[in-house]
C-alpha cells in the first residue's frame, strides 16, 4: 500500500463532469490499494470571478481581505469533490488549508508555508478516508487566512507529500507530461519519461508553464518524487526526481520560450564599484525579479547595464530606476518590450561544450539575430526579437531532438 | 459611545451598489461615535447557486460537506463589505464564523451555538476597527465548519450582541419594521414602534416572516434589545424588548397568516391512556413540529385526533403514522393540505376576554368558516380554508386596528 498525493488544477474540476472525472481517477487509485490525499484548486474561472467582484468594490483592495475572498474558491471545490467521491462509494472528507494544518507567514496573497501540522490529515487517513485538501491557502499566526500566490496549489501538494512522507506526488494537468518544447507549437516535441529537479527548475524558469518553480524547489528540498500527467488521459507522465536513469542519454531536455520579458538598459553608468548593487537593490526593494544581466563596456570610464525583468514589471522598474537615478548615475534608461527569451535546458550539456555552438548555428541558419546570451551549467538562454521566437524554438528543437 | 451590532441579510448585500449602501449605513453609525459589529449573510442568490452545484453532484450530499460549501457564501460577503468600508475610509476587518469564536454542536446544517469566544472581536474593536462577521456559521468540536440553519444570521447577530453586551442589535431587512399585518396584502397595516419578545415570538410562530423565532428566543433569554428596520430607508423601525411602554395601549399587535400548514386527522382512535404520547412521539422522532392539536370525542369509546404540521412535512408525517398505526390504532388517517392558519397576537388580550369573540364575529361577517381554534395567553389562531385566508386577515385587521 502506497500513500499518494494527487493534485488537480482548476480546469480539471471546472464543472460537474470534470469533477466526476477527477473522482474516478482518485477512486481508481484508492481501489488499487493506495491511501490518497487530493489537493484541488478553485474551479475554472472562480478565482477570476472573485477578483472581478473585488475590483467592483475597490481598485486597491486590502490584501488580507483578498485572501479571505479568494480562499472560498478552493473551499467550494473540495466540498464538491468530496461529495462526488461519496457518490462513487469512496469515503472522503474535505479540509480547508487551515484544517489541513498549513501555517504560513503573514505575506497576504503570496504567503510562504512555515509549518504543516499533518495530524488531522493523518487521522482522517487512518479512518480510511480519502482526504481532499484545499490547495493555495493557509493560516498565519494571527489566525487569518492567507493564500500562497501563483502555483500555490502545486506547492500545497508537494508540502503535504513531504510532511506525510508520501510515496509519490502526482500533479495532474491538461498536458500529458513535460515535453521537449511546447507541443502546441512544435508538433515534433517529445514527452520526457524523466527529468531532474534542476532541469525542471531551469525549464520552468525559462518559460515552460507545466510546473511552478516553487513547488519543484520544495520537491527537490524534501526529495519528493513528482509525476506530471494528464487528468483527461491519465497514462504515465513525466517523473521529476533528483537523478534520472538515462546514463548518457538525451543531451537536451527541452526548449522553452518566454515572452514575458522586457529588456532595460541604463546607458553610460559610471564604471565605479557599487553601481550594480545600487541599481539592483532598488529593484529588489520593489520585489522585481531581474533575470539576465549583461554589462557592456562604454567609451570613457562608463558602461551600459542591460538586464531583463518580467514584462508586467517593466513600467514599475523604469519608474523606480528614474526616481533613484541620482544614486547610480547614467545618461538614459531605455526599455524594450518587443523581445523574447528562448532557452535550451539539459543536464547533458555540462560535459558537452558543443551545445552552445550548435544552438547558435541553428539560430544563424534560421536568420535569427541574438541580442543577449546567458549561460548556466544546464541552460543556455538567448534574448531575441519577439517576432523570431517561434521560429527560433523550432530551429533549436530540430537541431537537438530527433 | 454605544456598541451596536448590525445585521444585514442577503438581499442587502446582493450587488456592488447594495454593499456600498450597507457600508454607508455602517459608516454613519460609526461616525456618530459608536463601535460597530456587522453580521452579514451570503449575497442574494449565492446560497441557492451553491445548493444547485451540490445537487448536480449528489441527490443526497453529506451534510458536513454542504456546510463546508455553504459557508463560503458569507465569507465572500464579509470580505467585500470590509473592502467597501475601507473605500469609505472606515477601518474594517472581516472574520469568518470560527474566527469570530462561534462554537456549535455538531448538528450539520442546523447547528446550535454552544459558546461564543468573543476575544478576537473585542480585540479588533479595541483596535478601532469595524468588525464584519460572517453570520450563519460556526465550528464544532472536531474543528469542522457548521451552519446554523434557517434564520442563522439573525441568531449570530443576537449571540454577538449578548456576548459583547451590546447596547442594541439592529436587524436590517427589506421592510421598515414589524407591522400589524403583512403590508403587501393589508394596505392599512401599521408599523409598530414597539413589541414585546413574547408577542414577537407568537407573531413569528404565526407566520410573520420578519424575524426568526430562534433569534427572538435568544434575545429574550439574554435581554438583547432588537430593532427591526429597513436597509433601504434606515429610519427608526420596531423595537423588540421585554416590556413595552404602551401602558394599556393597542390590544392587538398583529394579524398573521401561515399557509405552510397541513391538517392531519386520525379517525376513531381508542380513547385509552397513552394514545397521544404514541402518536406525537412517532412524529417527534422524525423532527416534525406539531402545532395545533384538537381532540374531539368519537362515538363509542373512541375519539378523533386532529393536528397541524408544516406542509412540507405532511407526506413524511402520513407515512410514519401509517407505518406505526399498529401502536395506537384508529381507523383512517386523512391529510388536508388546503388550509391556512390565521392568528391575532397581542399582550393586551390576556386581560381582555372580548378579543376572541370580536375575532370570531369578524370572521362570521366575512363568511369564513372556522375549522380549528387554538388559544394561548397572547394569541388566538384559527385554521380555515386556504382560499379564505387573505379575506380573513383583512377582516380581523379591520376589526382591531384602526
Image (cartoon, coloured by chain):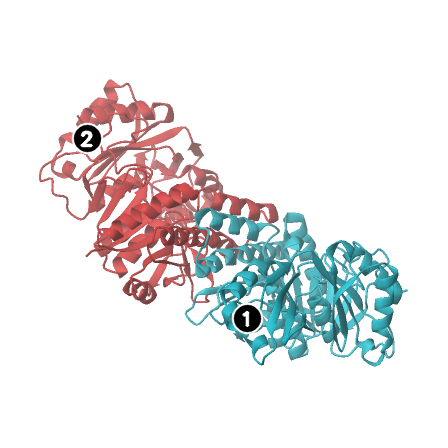
Chain colours: A cyan, B red
Q: Position of residue B113 (x, y in %)?
A: 35, 59
Q: Which residue is mark 1?
A: A329
Examine the rendered structure and indicate whether residue A254 appears above or below residue B286: below
**Residue A195 quadrant:** bottom right
Residue at 59%, 79% in the rendered image: A272
Residue B317 seen by the camera: yes
Residue at 40%, 63% in the rendered image: B99
Q: Position of residue B66 (x, y in %)?
A: 51, 53
**Residue depth check, mark 2 versus mark 1: number of the one nearer the observer:** 1
Residue at 44%, 41% in the rendered image: B313
On screen, residue B294 versus residue A276, left or right, reads: left
Examine the rendered structure and indicate whether residue B127 appears above or below residue B359: below
Q: Which residue is mark 2?
A: B356
Label pair 2/1, CB-CB below 8 angstroms: no
Examine the rendered structure and indicate whether residue A355 appears above or below residue A388: below
Q: Position of residue A332 (x, y in %)?
A: 59, 63
* Other residues around mark 2 within 10 Å, as few (<14) / some (14–19) / many (≥20): some
Spatial CA span between label 2 and label 1: 95 Å
On screen, residue A162 versus residue B200, left or right, reads: right
Q: Position of residue B108 (x, y in %)?
A: 46, 56
Q: Quadrant of the N terminus of chain B?
A: bottom left
How many numbered marks have been drawn onto this rendered protein structure?
A: 2
* Other residues around mark 1 within 10 Å, as few (<14) / some (14–19) / many (≥20): some
Amino acid at each position: 500500500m502506497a500513500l499518494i498525493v494527487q493534485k488537480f488544477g482548476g480546469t480539471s474540476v471546472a464543472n460537474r463532469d470534470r469533477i466526476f472525472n477527477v473522482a474516478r481517477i482518485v477512486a481508481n487509485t484508492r481501489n488499487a490499494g493506495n491511501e490518497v490525499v487530493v489537493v484541488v484548486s478553485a474551479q475554472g474561472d472562480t478565482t477570476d470571478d472573485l477578483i472581478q467582484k473585488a475590483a467592483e468594490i475597490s481598485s486597491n483592495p486590502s490584501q488580507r481581505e483578498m485572501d479571505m475572498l479568494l480562499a472560498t474558491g478552493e473551499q467550494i471545490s473540495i466540498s464538491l469533490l468530496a461529495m462526488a467521491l461519496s457518490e462513487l462509494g469512496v469515503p472522503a472528507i474535505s479540509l480547508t488549508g487551515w484544517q489541513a494544518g498549513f501555517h504560513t507567514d503573514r505575506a497576504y496573497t503570496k504567503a510562504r508555508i512555515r509549518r504543516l501540522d499533518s495530524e488531522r490529515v493523518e487521522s482522517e487517513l487512518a479512518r480510511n478516508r480519502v482526504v481532499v485538501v484545499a490547495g493555495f491557502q493557509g493560516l498565519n499566526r494571527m489566525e487569518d487566512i492567507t493564500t500562497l500566490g501563483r502555483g500555490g496549489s502545486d506547492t500545497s501538494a508537494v508540502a503535504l507529500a513531504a510532511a506525510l512522507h508520501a510515496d509519490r506526488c502526482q500533479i495532474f494537468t491538461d498536458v500529458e507530461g513535460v515535453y521537449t518544447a511546447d507541443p502546441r507549437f512544435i508538433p515534433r516535441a517529445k514527452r520526457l519519461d524523466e527529468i531532474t529537479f534542476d532541469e525542471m527548475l531551469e525549464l520552468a524558469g525559462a518559460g515552460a508553464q507545466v510546473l511552478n518553480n516553487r513547488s519543484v524547489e520544495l520537491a527537490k528540498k524534501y526529495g519528493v518524487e513528482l509525476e506530471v500527467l494528464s487528468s483527461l488521459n491519465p497514462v504515465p507522465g513525466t517523473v521529476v526526481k533528483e537523478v534520472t536513469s538515462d546514463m548518457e542519454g538525451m543531451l537536451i531536455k527541452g526548449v522553452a520560450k518566454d515572452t514575458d520579458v522586457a529588456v532595460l538598459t541604463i546607458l553610460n553608468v559610471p564604471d565605479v564599484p557599487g553601481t550594480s548593487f545600487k541599481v539592483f537593490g532598488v529593484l529588489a526593494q520593489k520585489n522585481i525579479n531581474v533575470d539576465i544581466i549583461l554589462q557592456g563596456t562604454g567609451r570613457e570610464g562608463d558602461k551600459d547595464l542591460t538586464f531583463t525583468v518580467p514584462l508586467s514589471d517593466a513600467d514599475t522598474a523604469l519608474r523606480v530606476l528614474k526616481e533613484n537615478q541620482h544614486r547610480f548615475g547614467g545618461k538614459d534608461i531605455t526599455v524594450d518590450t518587443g523581445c523574447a527569451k528562448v532557452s535550451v535546458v539539459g543536464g547533458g550539456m555540462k560535459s558537452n561544450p558543443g551545445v552552445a555552438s550548435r544552438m547558435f548555428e541553428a539560430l544563424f541558419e534560421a536568420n535569427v539575430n541574438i541580442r543577449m546570451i546567458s549561460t548556466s551549467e544546464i541552460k543556455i538562454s538567448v534574448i531575441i526579437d519577439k517576432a523570431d521566437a517561434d521560429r527560433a524554438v523550432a530551429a533549436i528543437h530540430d537541431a537537438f531532438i530527433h
